[in-house]
Amino acid sequence: MQTRKAIFPAKRHALYEDHGYSAAIKSGDFLFVSGQVGSRLDGTPEPDFKTQVELAFDNLKAVLEAADCSFDDIVDVTTFHTDPETQIADIMEVKESIFSEKPYPNWTAVGVTWLAGFDFEIKVIARTPST
C-alpha cells in the first residue's frame, strides 16, 4: 500500500485550516494538488480577476516547490471558471506565460457557478522528480 504525505507551502494561507484540507498529497511518484485560488494569506479573495489568476498560479507554485516540483512536472490541469467567456483572455495570458513551451500539460476547463467567493481555481497532478 502506498503511503500518502501531506504537503504544505512555507506560507500557508488560512483556507487550509479553515476548511480542513491539505494543499497537496504526495503518493508514490505523484503529487495531487488541491484546487488553488487567488487568495491572500488571510484567505480572502483578490478582487481584481487577472491578479486573482496570477495569485492562484503563485499559490500553486509555492505548493509545487514545497514538494520539490515545478510547473515542468505538471501532467494534468483542471481549472474552474465562474464566467469563462469573459475571463478566458486573462486566463490564457497568464497560462501562456507559465506554460510557454511544448509539450503542454493536458488541460480541462470547467465553467461553474460558485467558487466560495473566488472566480478561478486550478488543481493539478504532477509527477515528482526522481531522486
Image (cartoon, rainbow, N blue to C red):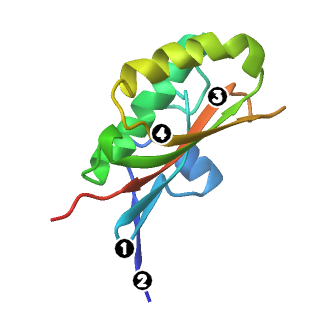
Label 3 sits on residue: 120
**Quarter of the picture holding the N terminus:** bottom left
* Separation (CA) of disc 2 from disc 3: 32 Å
Between discs 4 and 1, the one toward the N terminus: 4
Q: With 123 as the anchor, is 100 left or right in this view? A: left
Residue 78 quadrant: top right
**Quarter of the picture holding the C terminus:** bottom left
Label 2 sits on residue: 2
From the image, state whether disc 3 or disc 1 is nearer to you. Answer: 1
Label 4 sits on residue: 13
* Separation (CA) of disc 1 from disc 2: 6 Å
**Crowding near the residue tagged with mark 3, few <14, some 14–19, many ≥20 C-alpha atoms within 10 Å:** many
Between discs 3 and 4, the one toward the N terminus: 4
**Crowding near the residue tagged with mark 2, few <14, some 14–19, many ≥20 C-alpha atoms within 10 Å:** few
* Separation (CA) of disc 3 from disc 4: 16 Å
Where residue 95 appears, x then y in whole percent? 47, 23
In this orientation, which residue lies closer to the viewer: 113 or 104?
104
The kind of residue tagged 2 is: Gln
Label 1 sits on residue: 28
Residue 15 quadrant: top right
Where residue 62 appears, x then y in whole percent? 35, 39
The kind of residue tagged 3 is: Phe
Residue at far front of view: 102
Where residue 90 appears, x then y in whole percent? 58, 12
